[in-house]
Image: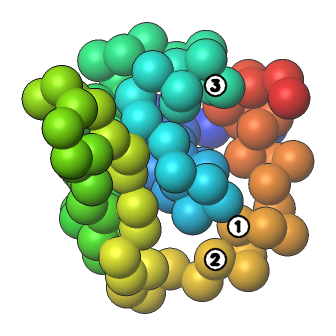
Amino acid sequence: MEVSKQQRAFFRKLYLSHLISQEPLNVTALQKMTGMPRRTLQDTLKDLGDIGIECSFIQQEGGRNNAGYYQIDCWGPIDPSWINKNLARLEAVLEISV
């Protein structure tokens, strides 16, 4: 199945949002889980608002400047149950082996 660059970017946003909604994760943890480059992860998280997903970084008290985790505050128009049902397809398109 041929997937466009735009569709791959959209799927990446959905997949990362799903992971963040399951447990508190930071960029380092996401990098280990997905194998995606750090910069790709940072850019994708920054752009979640483009599809209506609100995500925030929760700073851990007393920690370093980047110590903390991401959380999904609002899914906007996205249906998380669709992501759950299509998780294997997203992982296949993004070439992520669990």
Residue at 12% of width from left, 29% of height from top?
65
Q: Position of residue 58 (x, y in %)?
A: 27, 55
Judged left or right of residue 60, residue 8 is right
Q: Which residue is mark 1?
A: 83
Q: Position of residue 22 (x, y in %)?
A: 66, 60
Residue at 40% of width from left, 29% of height from top?
27
Q: Earlier in the sequence, mark 3 or mark 2?
A: 3
Disc 3 versus disc 2: distance between alpha carbons? 19 Å
Residue at 75% of width from left, 26% of height from top?
96
**Farthest residue toward the left?**
65
Location of residue 29 by image quarter? top right
Identify the secondary structure beneath mark 2.
helix
Q: Earlier in the sequence, mark 3 or mark 1?
A: 3
Judged left or right of residue 2, residue 48 is left
Mark identifier at residue 43 = none
Q: Which residue is mark 2?
A: 80
